[in-house]
Image (cartoon, rainbow, N blue to C red):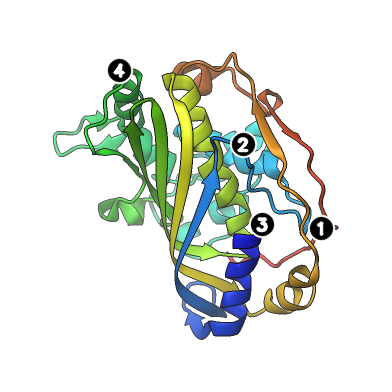
C-alpha cells in the first residue's frame, strides 16, 4: 500500500494538468512510475484504503487469457469492466467493423492468443511462453504483447497495460509488465491485482517458483473529477496490512485456465479495508 499511496501523493504534489482529447477531461499527470509486488511471499497488493472488488480484476484477466472479444463473455466470468468501452464509446459505435452489442473487436487477449500474421495464420503468443517455461527455457523473449498498432482501428480501445515479459532465473519466474497509461484511482487498483495474479498463475502452471513482479507505468494520472476524493478522502486514510491470495492448486495447465477455472478458484485471506469510494469512470 505504501508505494501506491506514495504514487498518488506524488501525482497530487508534482503532477501537471493535461487535457485528454479522448475523454474531454483534464488529468493531473506524472511521467514514470515503478511498482514492485512480492509474489514469492504472497503480499497481495490489494488496496485497503477503500474497498477493492478484486474478483472483477482477476475475472477480467482470465478473459484476456482466454482471448475473449465480447463483453458478454467477460460478464459471464464475473466482470462488467468492458461494458462501457464496448457499448458506450461513440467512436467505436460508429466504426463499421463493430459486429454489434458487446463486441470489443481485436483488443487485449485477442492479440495475445491470435495475433494475425502476414500469411493469414494466427500466432498464439501465450502458448509459446507457457511451452518454453514448462521446459525451463527462457529465450529472453518471453513477451506477451497486446499492442498491435496495425489493428488499433479494429478494436474499441488501445491497450493500456500492453506488454508482459517473463524472465526465468533457475526455477524462479519473474514478470515485468509495461503500461502506457494508468487511471490511478480506478485502473491501478485492477492493474496491480492482475500483474501479481498473472505471475502467480504462470509460475503455478509451469512448475516454477514465483519471484517478484515489476510494474512500469509511463503516464500515471488522476482525472480532475477524481482529485477531491483522492486528495481529501483516500489519502487521509490509514492503510491495513496486505492480505494474501490463495489459488486453487488443481490449476496446473493453460488448458485449465482456458476451460474450467472460475472465480471460486481464488480466495483472498485477511482483507481489511475502508469504505468504498465511487470514483468517476472516463470512457
Q: Which residue is mark 1?
A: 276
Between disc 3 and disc 2, whose residue precedes?
3
Q: Depth-wise, is mark 2 or mark 4 nearer the camera?
A: 2
Residue, x 46% and y 53% (percent of image)?
Answer: 215
Q: Which residue is mark 2?
A: 42
Q: Is 129 drawn above or below residue 112 in the view shown? A: above
Q: Secondary structure at mark 1?
A: loop
Judge left or right: residue 278 versus residue 211: right
Mark 1 crowd level (few <14, some 14–19, many ≥20, 10 Å Cα): few
Residue farthest right in this picture: 275
Judge left or right: residue 270 versus residue 25: right
Cα distance between the residues tagged 2 and 1: 24 Å
Of the numbered discs in the image, which one, if any, rests on residue 135? 4
Mark 2 crowd level (few <14, some 14–19, many ≥20, 10 Å Cα): some
Q: Secondary structure at mark 4?
A: loop
Between disc 2 and disc 4, whose residue precedes?
2
Q: Position of residue 16 (x, y in %)?
A: 51, 85
Residue, x 28% and y 56% (percent of image)?
Answer: 149
Q: Depth-wise, is mark 2 or mark 1 nearer the camera?
A: 2
Between disc 1 and disc 4, whose residue precedes?
4
Q: Which residue is mark 3?
A: 1
Cα distance between the residues tagged 3 and 1: 16 Å
Q: Is 265 drawn above or below residue 75 in the view shown? A: above
Q: Depth-wise, is mark 3 or mark 1 nearer the camera?
A: 3
Q: Is 31 drawn above or below residue 103 in the view shown? A: below
Cα distance between the residues tagged 3 and 2: 14 Å
Amino acid at each position: 500500500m505504501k508505494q501506491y499511496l506514495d504514487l498518488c501523493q506524488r501525482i497530487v504534489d508534482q503532477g501537471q494538468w493535461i487535457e485528454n482529447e479522448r475523454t474531454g477531461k483534464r488529468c493531473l499527470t506524472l511521467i514514470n512510475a515503478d511498482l514492485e509486488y512480492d509474489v514469492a511471499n504472497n503480499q497481495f497488493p490489494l488496496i485497503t484504503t477503500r474497498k477493492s472488488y478484486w474478483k472483477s480484476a482477476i475475472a477480467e484477466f482470465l478473459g484476456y487469457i482466454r482471448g475473449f472479444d465480447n463483453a458478454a463473455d467477460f460478464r459471464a466470468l464475473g466482470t462488467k469492466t468492458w461494458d462501457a468501452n464496448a457499448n458506450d464509446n461513440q467512436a467505436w459505435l460508429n466504426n463499421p467493423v463493430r459486429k454489434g452489442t458487446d463486441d470489443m473487436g481485436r483488443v487485449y487477449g485477442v492479440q495475445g492468443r491470435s495475433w494475425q500474421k502476414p500469411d493469414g495464420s494466427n500466432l498464439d503468443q501465450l502458448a509459446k511462453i507457457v511451452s518454453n517455461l514448462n521446459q525451463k527455457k527462457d529465450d529472453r523473449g518471453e513477451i506477451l504483447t497486446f499492442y498491435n498498432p496495425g489493428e488499433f482501428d479494429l478494436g474499441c480501445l488501445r491497450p493500456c497495460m500492453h506488454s508482459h515479459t517473463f524472465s526465468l532465473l533457475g526455477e524462479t519466474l519473474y514478470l515485468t509488465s509495461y503500461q502506457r497509461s494508468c487511471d490511478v484511482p480506478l485502473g491501478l487498483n485492477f492493474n496491480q491485482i492482475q500483474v501479481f495474479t498473472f505471475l502467480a498463475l504462470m509460475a503455478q502452471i509451469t512448475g516454477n517458483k514465483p519471484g517478484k513482479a515489476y510494474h512500469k507505468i509511463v503516464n500515471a494520472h488522476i482525472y480532475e473529477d477524481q482529485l477531491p476524493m483522492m486528495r481529501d478522502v483516500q489519502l487521509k486514510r490509514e492503510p491495513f496490512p496486505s492480505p494474501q491470495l490463495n489459488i486453487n492448486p488443481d490449476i496446473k495447465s493453460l488448458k485449465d485456465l482456458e476451460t474450467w477455472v472460475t472465480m471460486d478458484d481464488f480466495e483472498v485471506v485477511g482483507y481489511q479495508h475502508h469504505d468504498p469510494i465511487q470514483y468517476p469512470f472516463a470512457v
